[in-house]
Image (cartoon, rainbow, N blue to C red):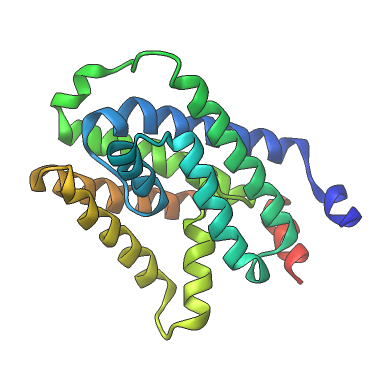
């Protein structure tokens, strides 16, 4: 464990917190008021907020912990530390943003714009965190866990989890809005993929070493 703490870099932590803050900002100011939701853990937190009044600052953190508990054997220790940092960062920043009125209330009437802008926030923010070596949500850990016990490629598990949450979201979001949600899920996934191609010297190499 001592060697893991030696591998933690301040620059990595700052990027993780920056990505988490960006994600919390987008989720609160775009997704939560526009009716354009996300799939996976993000979409589930919004579903719980709507029906049970549970803040994503709490549900997101709790669901992430559960997912990483299930997948901790498949993830490197450094990845888990970085994921914990980003998850805590997301919860703290979302809790802060909740203290203020949304900055773009008019976007609630522009679902197409919300879908695109929301995808940018989610794609870039999660892309930053995952590229550094952590993740603010448990989607990655859950997908890896299921792919280890099911004869299904991991990309289909990601898609399946998104579709399940989007279908459940039909309970409070009109079908036309869900189509916009599907658009934002597809766009954010592509943006995350692009972010993974950006070279950040040292980060990926250290993560891979920690898993060996």
Count of numbered labels shown in the rendering = 0
Q: Is residue 129 above or below residue 74?
A: above
Q: Residue furthest front?
A: 52
Image quarter where the C terminus lies is bottom right
Residue 200 in sight from this viewpoint: no
Outermost residue toward the right? 2
Foreground of the two, 51 or 205:
51
Seen at 60% across and 41% down, the residue is 86
Residue 24 shows up from this direction: yes
Q: Residue at x 48, y 76 (%)?
A: 147
- Where is residue 199 shown, x and y percent of the image? 60, 50
Percent x, y of residue 129: 57, 45
Q: Would you say 5 lies left or right of 108 here? A: right
Q: Nearer the viewer, residue 165 or 18?
A: 165
Q: Position of residue 172 (x, y in %)?
A: 17, 43
Seen from the viewer's position, the closer of residues 25 and 45 is 45
Pick the quarter of the image with the N terminus.
bottom right
Q: Is residue 3 left or right of residue 210?
A: right
Q: Residue at x 77, y 63 (%)?
A: 210
- Along the horizontal axis of the image, is 5 left or right of 52? right
Give the camera-side residue of 54 and 9: 54
Q: Which residue: 24% across, 18% down?
A: 105
Image coordinates of residue 118 in percent, x first then y, are 32, 36
């Amino acid at each position: 464990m001592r060697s893991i703490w030696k591998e933690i870099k301040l620059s990595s932590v700052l990027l993780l917190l920056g990505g988490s803050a960006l994600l919390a900002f987008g989720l609160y100011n775009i997704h939560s008021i526009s009716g354009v939701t996300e799939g996976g853990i993000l979409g589930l937190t919004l579903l719980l907020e709507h029906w049970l009044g549970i803040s994503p600052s709490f549900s997101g953190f709790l669901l992430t912990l559960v997912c990483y508990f299930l997948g901790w054997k498949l993830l490197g220790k450094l990845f888990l530390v970085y994921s914990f940092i980003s998850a805590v960062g997301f919860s703290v920043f979302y809790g802060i943003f909740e203290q203020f009125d949304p900055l773009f209330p008019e976007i609630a009437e522009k679902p197409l714009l919300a879908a695109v802008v929301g995808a940018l926030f989610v794609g870039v923010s999660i892309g930053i965190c995952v590229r550094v070596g952590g993740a603010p949500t448990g989607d990655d850990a859950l997908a890896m866990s299921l792919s280890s016990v099911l004869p299904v490629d991991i990309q289909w598990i990601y898609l399946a989890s998104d579709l399940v949450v989007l279908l459940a979201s039909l309970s409070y979001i009109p079908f036309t809005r869900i189509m916009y949600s599907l658009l934002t899920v597809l766009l954010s996934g592509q943006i995350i993929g692009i972010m993974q191609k950006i070279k950040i010297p040292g980060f990926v190499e250290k993560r891979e070493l920690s898993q060996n």
